[in-house]
Amino acid sequence: MPELFAKRVRWKKLGVILPPQPQHRWWQSHTMVPTPLKIDDTKVRLYFSGRNDKNQSHIGWALIDLREPERVLEVSNEPVLAPGSLGCFDDNGVTPSSIITDGDETLLYYIGWNPGSTVRMHIFGGLAISRDGGLTFERWSNAPIIERNRVNPYLNTAPFVMKEGGNWRMYYVSCTEWKNPDLPRYNIQIAESADGRNWKREGRVAIPFRDERENALARPFVLKEDGIYKMWFAHRGDAYRMGYAESRDGLDWKRDDAFGGLDVTPGGFDAEMIEYFAIVPYAGRKIMFYNGDDFGRHGVGVAVEA
């Protein structure tokens, strides 16, 4: 049986590689939630959301050379997904969360943003599909794929999806309560599906709160390596930090944040907070893309396994 927490990963930070580019009307600020799609042996298309002058998020991409991960080869001129129709769950913004290839389809699972009234916001997970390798997308539905239900009556968002054989599994963020109109409390739960579109949720928690001070467990990202499922996520009491957990079956998880390996850097773009990690294995080591202060205001940073 494979051993959990057999190796502690250490990272070398290379700095910011993808700051906002205000010459793009849809990308006036922030480069948020990097989400990788491997294109070939040496390149990854990194999806992200940038915000326009109304603070509405749009999804674009950057092409990254994994041999020199601080090198950006190309950036999309236009977003591949814009906010949805007025009144829909994503009419005030869209942010990528997970992307996978299934046959001739590329499935983009994303976060849809909608302002609240009694609470600050409503956010739910959506799905858009590409049939040209991830260059253009169409919504599978104008409705979210993880809305409120009996076991998840509040916000449900940040889906990370894996497919193994014919089985689909989602790790997603679900709110358990609003402590006040500006402060939701959310953990990471598990859903199952037969087709990647329709999801069964029973309230199974993957990563519970560590204690009463912990208010947020955000954006899970999972790799399966040497028979072990490894999850990076962000956790927050006062400010986001890296969280980490491992599992033998992808269902029952053990948490040890010290094995995540990355922390804030005083004086850096990530001096106050660090979050939204995405990991790409390449040439025997891991490459991590992530955000820092103010949820990606300064751009995407990169670190490599040391």
Image (spheres, rainbow, N blue to C red):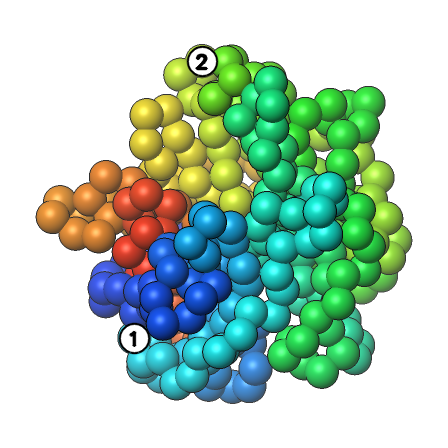
Q: Residue at x 51, y 86 (%)?
A: 41
- Pointer 2 local density, CA inside 10 Å: few below 14, some 14–19, many at least 20: few
140 on left or right of 211: right
Residue wearing tag 2 = 212
Q: Looking at the picture, how far across and down is residue 244, in whole percent?
A: 44, 42
Q: Quadrant of the C terminus?
A: bottom left
Q: CA distance from mark 1 to mark 2?
A: 38 Å
Q: Residue at x 37, y 45 (%)?
A: 295
Q: Nearer the viewer, residue 58 or 16?
A: 58
Q: Looking at the picture, how far across and down is residue 76, in whole percent?
A: 49, 78
Q: Looking at the picture, how far across and down is residue 179, in whole percent?
A: 51, 13
Kind of residue at disc 2: Glu
**Quarter holding residue 5:** top left
Residue wearing tag 1 = 70
Q: Is residue 250 above or below residue 150?
A: below
137 on left or right of 58: right
